[in-house]
Amino acid sequence: MSEHRHFIHHKPFGYLCQFVCELPKKKLVGQLYDFPPGTMAIGRLDEQSEGLLLLTTDGLVSEHIRSRKIEKEYYAQVDGLVTDEAVEQLRQGVEIGIREVRYRTKPCKVFRLESDPGFAARSRKIRDDRHGPTSWVSITLTEGKYRQVRKMTAAAGFPTLRLVRVRIGNIFLGDLQAGEVTEVAEFRCE
């Protein structure tokens, strides 16, 4: 029986968390590195989202990390200067739509970042500064509904302009640059 392999990846903007896609001209994570057969992304980031993506050949590890026991932290650049009221609203949970059904998000950890986190410029400009100020918030969840963070910030009145996952459990994005992959012996997500 062969040993499983595990990877930490900084998924760049504009890539799908897939290895095969029938849509033409789509950029796939599987094109960025010579992953072994059977590699799967643990959780997903949509095409416009960036940041920490864990990949593995071990389905049991994937199942554990996707569970509600493991925190996932995101930095969201939002339109406008996020207010204390919006931060508290996000902490308590907001109502969002999931497949045309209303859903109230679970309470979570949210705080305003006092400065720009300093990520490298994205491959496509977010918007022109003439459209007003932006700010950053950290949102830490244990659930993962489709486009949840984007829907949450919009529900609080501050639509997400850029979304970067920075942590899964005790694994951090750190200074890994967009597109880079690091192979690790194992994941110890707590």
Image: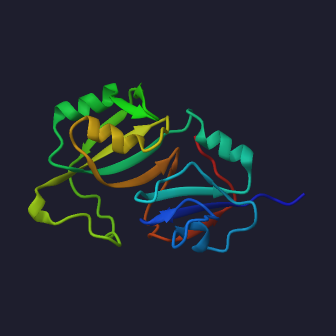
Viewer-closest of 15 and 23:
23
**Residue beneath the point at 59% across and 45% down:** 189
Taking the view exactly as shown, the residue that stands out farthest to the right is 1
Whether residue 55 is situated above or below residue 154 in the rendered picture: below
Quadrant of the rendering where the N terminus is positioned: bottom right
- Residue 39, visible in the rendered structure: yes
| Residue 62 image position (x, y, % from top left) | 66, 46
| Residue 138 image position (x, y, % from top left) | 33, 45
Give the color scheme: rainbow, by chain, secondary structure or one colour. rainbow
Horizontal side, residue 6 vs residue 169: left or right? right
Whether residue 20 is situated above or below residue 150 in the rendered picture: below
Viewer-closest of 84 and 149:
149
- How many numbered discs? 0
Whether residue 102 is situated above or below residue 29 in the rendered picture: above
Can you tell which quarter of the image residue 155 is in? top left
Viewer-closest of 173 and 66:
66
**Residue beneath the point at 35% across and 40% down:** 151
Quadrant of the rendering where the C terminus is positioned: top right
Viewer-closest of 41 and 72:
41
Horizontal side, residue 164 vs residue 118: left or right? right
**Residue beneath the point at 40% across and 59% down:** 48
